[in-house]
Each structure stands twice: as C-alpha cells, then as structure tokens.
Amino acid sequence: MLLRRKSMALMFMAVVLMAGLLQGCSFKTDEKEGPGTELVLWTFNELHEKFFLQMADQWNQQHPDELINLKANTFPYDNHHSKLSIALQSGVGAPDIADIEVNKIGNFLKGIPQLVPLNPVIDPEINNIVPSRVQIYGKDGKYYGIDFHVGAEVMYYNKEIMDQAGVNPDSIVTWADYAAAGKQVLAKTGKPMATLETNDLWSYWPMISQQNSDFLDDKGELTLDNETNIKTLEFLQQMVKDKVAIPSPGGGHHMEEYYGFMNKGGAASVWMPMWYMGRFTDYMPDLKGKIIIRPMPAWEKGGYRSAGMGGTGTVVTNQSEHQDLAMRFLAFAKLSKQGNVEIWKQLGFDPIRSEVWTMPEAKAKNKFTEYFGTNIFDTLIEVKDEINAVHIGPKTPDIASAVRNKILYRTLQSGEDPATVLHELADELR
Amino acid sequence: MATPVHTNANVPTGQPPKTQRPARSQWSRFIHSSRTAPYVFVLPFLLSFALFFAYPVISTVIMSFQEVLPGITTYVGLENYKDLINPTFGKAILNSVLYTLLTLVVLIPLPLVLAVLLNSPKMPGRGLFRSVMFIPALTSVVVAGTIFRLMFGELDGSLMNSLLGVFGLEPYKWLMNANTGFLALIVLALWRWLGVNMLYYMSGLQNIPPELYEAAQIDGASRFDSFWRITIPMLKPVTIYVFTISIYAGLSMFTESYMLWNGNNSPNDIGLTIVGYLYRQGLEQNSMGFGAAVGIVLLVFTLVLNLIQLKFFGMFRKED
C-alpha cells in the first residue's frame, strides 16, 4: 500500500516536472498595460529609446483615436543585433520596430529580408530628405530603414591648442595643409594634431569616400585594395610616422581612455561625423567653448570636404501584428518635420530632412549650441552637396570587421605596409 | 523463518474476498507496472536531454551543411567546412590552444601547492585565505573582464602602468600587443579559477589517510618525499578531473576575451578564440551555417583532445 502511494506520488512529481518543462517552452507574454496598441521597440542606444518614447507621447497627443503604448528596450550593441537577427531568422520573438546600425544592415538584407518595405511612407517624402540616408538600407528598389541623420563628417578643432600653435583652422583647405599645420602644432605645443581610430572606421572610411572611393563599388564588388584606398592609408601612416597623428588611446573615439585623453586637451583636432557632438557634450565637458566645427580638408582645392558616415536605420519587422501603425509612427518620428526638429534638439544629430537645417530651431539654445556655438548648421549647409553615398552590401559586415580588427591596427599601430595588408585582406574577403 | 504474508491491497480487510477481482484498466496497469515505472521516472530527463541537447546538436550538424540566409536555406554540401581553411580560423585555433596550455601550466600546480599549504593545520588564517581565494569565482566574468580591461588600460593612470611608473618605466599598451594581451587573459583566468581548483584539491587532500604520512614519517621520509610520493599520486583522480575540465574551459573561452577587448574585436585578432570566431561568423556576420560548422569542429576537437588525455592518464584501464 505504502509502496503504491509512493509510486503514485513519484508519478505525480514526474508529471508536474514534465508540465513545468513544457511550460518553460511557452513564449506567450501577452500583457497589456495602459491604453493604446502595444508596439515593442528594440534599440542599442539609450538616447534613441528616450527619443522614441518622447515621440510616442507626441503621437498620442495628436492621434487620440489611435493611441500607441510603446514598450522600448535598450540592449548592448552586439547583443541587440544578434538577438534581432536570431528572432528574425527563427520567426518568433522579434519586436515591431528595431534600430539596425548601418554596418549591420547587410546581415538583414541577405536572402529575403524579414523586414517591411517602408516605401509607402518614404516615397512621398524622398524629395524632402537626403535620399542616400534611406538608400543605404534598401535592396531592389525597396527601402527597409530610415536613418536618424546625415552623418556628415566634420573636423572638430580645439581652438585653444590651434591658437597656441598659431594656426588658423580656416586656412586649412587640403589634407596637405592639414599635415603641414600638424607639424607646426607638434613643434609649438608638443601635441599631436589628430588621433586615428584603429578599431573603428570613422577616420579612414570618410577619407576614401571624399575621393569617390569605397570598400565596395556600386555593383557590390570589393574595391578595398584599390589605388586610392592604398594611397590614403599610406597618407595616414605617414602622419603617424611624423607624429602628427597618433593611434587613438584605447583604439577608437568611443573609448573611456580616449575621452579622458581628449578632455585634457590631448590632441588639437579630430574628424568625426556630426553625430559625435553628443560625445563631446556628455563625455568631454571640459572642452566646452573650446571646440569649433569646420568642414574636413579636401584632397585638392575644390574637392569634397565631407562624407556621410555611420547611421542607424529604424525598421519594422514582418513579425509585427501592427505593421501599418508601426510604419506610420516611424514616419512621424523620423520623416516628419516635427520629428526631425526633435532629432536635432534631443540627440544633436544632423537630421535627414534638409529644410530643418535652416529653421530657427537649428540655432535655438540647447546643449549643443551652448557647447559648439550657434553656427553648427552653417558648416553642414556649406558641405551638403559634397557628400558621396557609401555603398552598403551583404559583404559590409565582413569588411567592417576586417578593417576594424586588422587593417588599421596592422598599418597604423604595427607599421606594416598598407598595400600588402590591403591586398592580403581583400584576397581573403573575395 | 517467518512465513511471508501476501496481502492483497485491493481486498479490504474484514470483508470476504470477492470471487472475481475487478479488471484493472489499461492505464492503471500501465502506471502500476514495475516495468514501465522507471521509464516514466527518467522521462523528464530524457525529454529535457532530447529537447535541449540532442535536438540542437543534430540541428547544428544539419545546419553545418547549409547556407542559412533570412528566408532561404540551401544545402551547400561541404562548402562551409572547406571555407574553414582560412588564416583567421587558424589563428583562432592557435589562440585557443595556447590559452588552454597556458592555463593548464598555471592552474594545476599553483592550486595544488596552495591547497597543501592551506590544508596544513600550522597555516595561520586558513579560513580567511580559503574564502579570499574563492571569492573571485563568484564574481561575474563580465564585471571581472571590465575591471581587468581598466587595469590593463594604456593610459598612465591604469593600475598596471602606475606600477610601471613606480619603477620609472614608460606606460605600455598592454592590450594592443599579443604577448601582454595574453598575459592579461592568463592573469584573469588565474585570478578567477585559482580558488575553484584549490577547492577540488583540498577535498582530494582530505581523503588521503593520515596513516600514510605517519608511516612515511616513521620510515624517515622528508616533507618533500611525502608530498612527492604520497600527496601527488593520491591526488591523481582530482588532477585528472581538473585537467579535463580545464581543457574544456580553455577551449570554450570567449567571454573573458570579449570583455577584455570591449567586444569581439581584439586588434589583429590577438584575443580571437574558436568560440569568438563562431560568434563572429554565426551571429555578427549572420552566417549560421558556417558558424555551425565551426561549432562542430570545436566539438570534435575538444572530444578528441580529452579522449587522448584520458587515455594518457590511464582512465580507461580497469582498476587494479
């Protein structure tokens, strides 16, 4: 009798265990809080999250009959893209809306994209925005993402150091002028003119883009080791040899070491996209009022003085149950005039809708105009026609990885021959 | 000898037995059968094993022969395995093997010696040291990796460069150089796992009968003789265990490198491991099929290495 009870009890436990096990496999988390349609957003940048939440509030004020309950989540950069990729591959668990960084978009455009084409909202606005900022997230005539910004590459000069060295930044027109001014800065102040990224792309890529070159051509063929790219890398290496430039402390312009170094006036200038302004205001507070923004030097007089770099496309996934609403909300946040003004005011980005650049809001007081002055957009307007579109394709994530991990390190840190390194890596990637 | 009493549980006591027992239902017979019960009891394990281990492994094997793109999956035969023959994967294997060897070199003798010291009743502050050595194992590898990245930072103010400064040496870019980068990895592994391995050895030491040492002492053996001829041979099973898990842990290392270089992007891949390569290909580049092939190679590699090692230690010989 006792044995029987025991076996029954054990059997019961086994059933409970199995039930628990199977319960663990269920994914349903259907909780509805607050009024409105729930939309889930994933991003890798806390500031983006704040921006979207703010835009959801504005949407709700203007669309009381179509309320949105936006659930936003921020994950670390790599983690975010991996999670999103797995959710889209497996067909379960993806959010309605997600951010995808431009270097990662290639992964999501492979095969049949699991994203919703945004043409219904982009096509009517294409003449009001910088078109390349949606084209880089496109495939076969369909646009899958909308960027936050133009990402115009500019030069940030430390006016204090330049004055000490007796160099007027406005007299620097070409890269040759820049290198020569760098020698003077080094001689007068003992400080390098520039820091170069060895673990990211924002020093090297814009320089080749200025010369109509790229890592891929417009057909998606690899051009990593072409003559222009080799010469540009040789130029950078020469600056390092002359001590005019140093490899960035920590490897890149987003490292704790770099912020500390630069904040103490470590180098006289740095070229980065306009979206980098937020890093100055947030992580290099001591440079407030000392940094001026100017166009990049051109390779020859009259040449291009900028390049469109980086970017985050926001997409709607095909797993969303409210694709139409998500798309319209996205258009409200990132394509509308109101949204673009907010992108500038909140994030300090150069918005893709060009009419915003000349609006009074562009000069209104905010933390960016207080830090850099009120003429930020003058620089952007000056160079707006000098920005080549970059070529993004399925190979881009692979190329970005090779440039980040190997090419820049081996040539700028270890001093290997640029032509040899570029040929070797290009062969490996082909 | 008492006669065994057979009672029929179905028959209530005090009542005349019924002439015909009620027929048991199929289900009742099934769940009361002593033949099926064990299977039912192990079923939860079998199910979880099948669901969370066998199924993923089989899927991985299948995927390693496929090109998996969003929305499209195609069989590519051995293409993924052919693509594995490339310098980057070679470097990842070399790094993983080197890391494993170096961790074996430090993480077996050091914990052994420390365990012997901390096991000695003459050692002052034994409890304190045991705790202190073990605490790092409880620290998250993410936190530890971040702290080590800052310690080995390249600016003058980082801990390691401050130490160099004391001796009047120039600051050094620790994590930009293959040798010093590896040094940081090994120091991190040592800091984290020393206490765990020490604990294994301490439990092994407590199982050695004290009579052996007494007998040795009577025979005039020195302390070193006792250590060499009694402690080390008696700890062989523990050593084999630590060796086996260290090989596995070394070859599967990823998070330490990921945290130390702030992502899977160590300069010139000086910290790239096999799992790092799997992560890069499978997730960062979205080539799931190729990543699966890397995983299968790692599985076979680890299995073969561990089998050779166990064979070498005589684990497959029958006990004397």
Image: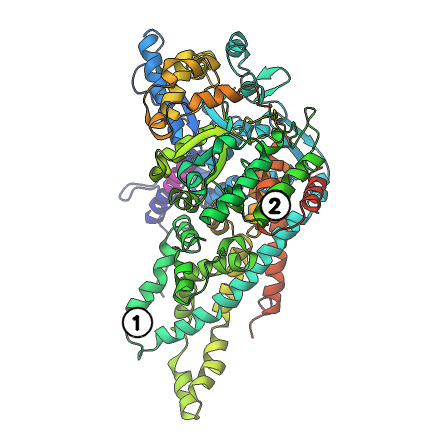
| B307 lies left or right of A316 | right
Q: Residue furthest front?
A: A166
Q: What is the span of residues highlighted in magenta in the rendered image?
A: A11-21
As drawn, B59 above or below B175: above
Q: Is residue B175 magenta?
A: no
Residue at the spot of label 2: A237
Q: What is the crowding at mark 2: few (fewer than 14 residues within 10 Å), some, or many (at least 20)?
A: many
Residue at the spot of label 1: B126
In what quadrant of the picture does the C terminus of chain A appear?
Answer: top right
Subunit of label 2: A
Q: Is residue A17 magenta?
A: yes
* Three-letter amino acid code of the residue under disc 2: Gln
The residue nearer to you, when weighing A405 against A387, is A387
Q: What is the crowding at mark 1: few (fewer than 14 residues within 10 Å), some, or many (at least 20)?
A: some
The residue nearer to you, when weighing A396 against B208, is A396
| Image x and y of residue A193, in percent | 50, 42
| A245 lies left or right of B63 | left
* Three-letter amino acid code of the residue under disc 1: Arg
| Image x and y of residue B45, in percent | 47, 45
Residue at disc 1, secondary structure: helix
Q: For the stretch drawn in magenta, what is the main secondary structure?
A: helix
| A376 lies left or right of B81 | left
> Which corner quadrant of the image does residue B5 belong to?
bottom left
> Which corner quadrant of the image does residue B126 belong to?
bottom left
- Which residue is located at x 62 percent, y 44 percent? A407
The residue nearer to you, when weighing A370 against B154, is A370
Residue at disc 2, secondary structure: helix
As drawn, A358 above or below B215: above
- C-alpha distance separating marks 2 and 1: 56 Å
